[in-house]
Image (cartoon, rainbow, N blue to C red):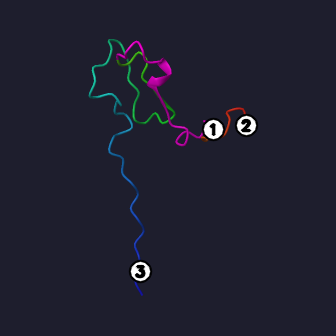
Amino acid sequence: MISRLPLALPVSVFRDDEPVIQSHPVLEGACPPLFGNTGCWDLNGIVRRAPNLAAAGFRVIFRELDPQLPAPGIPPWV
């Protein structure tokens, strides 16, 4: 009989206190989101965006990682 070892837990590539934006210049006085912030990365006012892009397009929302936010497909009022 072959016994199987449990799978190792995944290891994060980035530390929780590491800034998300590292390859683009950050606007003066901006505080970029950190990898440990799993609710939303709001990049408005952090990096320059083209004027024809909506501000909502510069937000990354992680609904499945934040227990405070509803899961995808579930309206927020439920």
Query: Which corner quadrant holds the N terminus?
Result: bottom left
Q: Would you call the spot at circle 3 few (<14 residues within 10 Å), some (14-19), or many (20 or more)?
A: few
Tell me what residue is drawn at x 43 percent, y 36 percent.
36
Using residue 52 as the reference point, say whether residue 22 is left or right of it. left
Look at mark 2 in the image and give the residue it sits on: 78
Q: Would you call the spot at circle 2 few (<14 residues within 10 Å), some (14-19), or many (20 or more)?
A: few
Q: Amino acid at mark 2?
A: Val
- 54 is within the stretch colored magenta: yes
Kindly report the distance in space between the C-alpha atoms of the residues bearing marks 2 and 1.
8 Å
Q: Position of residue 57 (x, y in %)?
A: 46, 24
1 or 3: tag closer to the N-terminus: 3
Tell me what residue is drawn at x 41 percent, y 76 percent.
4
2 or 1: tag closer to the N-terminus: 1
Look at mark 1 in the image and give the residue it sits on: 70
Tell me what residue is drawn at x 38 percent, y 20 percent.
31
Q: Amino acid at mark 3?
A: Ser
Q: Position of residue 53 (x, y in %)?
A: 43, 18
Read off the magenta span. Answer: 48-70
Look at mark 3 in the image and give the residue it sits on: 3
Q: Amino acid at mark 1?
A: Pro
